[in-house]
């Protein structure tokens, strides 16, 4: 599979258009009020993407990853995400790949119903 075929599985024309309004570093300092544009998931791992821009034949995303040992902010490559496959056949799930949550509508991080995400945001931004 070529790089463009892999990338196009995650980067739809609609998503590329939406991200034009949210290039890297465009939401610095917004904390819980940052807009999440898209969610990608692979099993229990969720990437809440707030910013992204094309870089050559790839896209660089910035967001929060939850569902791993630690929830954290980070950068991700669309090509790398699209190339990851996890063989979950022994659990009857076949091969898992990152997929876009097509039902997700852009909203502030504070509005997303994900306990891990909200605990992470509270630890960072809620002061007693």
Image: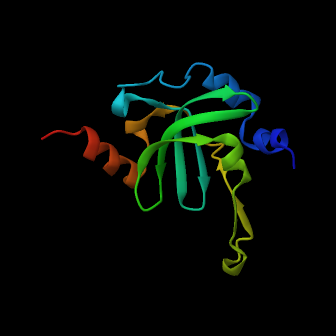
Left or right for 60, reference 119: right
On the picture, is 120 further left or further right than 103? left
- Quadrant for residue 5, please give it: top right
Tell me the residue at 68%/22% (across/down). 17
80 is higher (above) or lower (below) than 106: below
Farthest residue to the left: give it: 128
Residue lying at the far front of the rendered structure = 56
Which quadrant holds residue 110?
top left
Question: In this image, 11 relative to 21: left or right?
Answer: right
Q: Quadrant of residue 76?
A: top right
Q: Residue furthest top?
A: 21
Residue 47, compared with residue 111, is above or below; it is below
Give the percent coordinates (x, y) of residue 115. 38, 54
**Residue at (72%, 36%) from the top-left corner?**
11
For image coordinates 40% across by 57% down, the residue present is 70
Split into 4 quadrants, where in the image is the C terminus?
top left
Q: Is residue 107 above or below residue 91?
A: above
> Where in the figure is residue 89, as x and y percent of width and height?
73, 76
Whether residue 114 can be seen here: yes
Image mark count: 0
Residue 66 in the image: state x and y as whole percent: 46, 53
Q: Is residue 79 above or below residue 83?
A: above
| Residue 104 visible here | no
Q: Colour mode?
A: rainbow
Q: Residue, x 37% and y 29% (percent of image)?
A: 33
């Amino acid at each position: 599979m070529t790089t463009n075929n892999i990338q196009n599985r995650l980067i739809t024309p609609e998503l590329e258009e939406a991200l034009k309004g949210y290039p890297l570093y465009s939401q610095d300092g917004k904390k819980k009020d940052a807009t999440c544009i898209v969610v990608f998931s692979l099993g229990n791992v969720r990437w809440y993407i707030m910013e992204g821009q094309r870089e050559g034949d790839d896209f660089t995303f910035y967001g929060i990853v939850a569902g791993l040992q630690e929830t954290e902010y980070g950068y991700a490559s669309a090509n790398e995400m699209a190339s990851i496959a996890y063989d979950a056949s022994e659990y009857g799930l076949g091969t898992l790949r990152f997929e876009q949550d097509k039902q997700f509508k852009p909203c502030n991080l504070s509005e997303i119903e994900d306990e891990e995400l909200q605990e992470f945001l509270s630890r960072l931004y809620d002061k007693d």
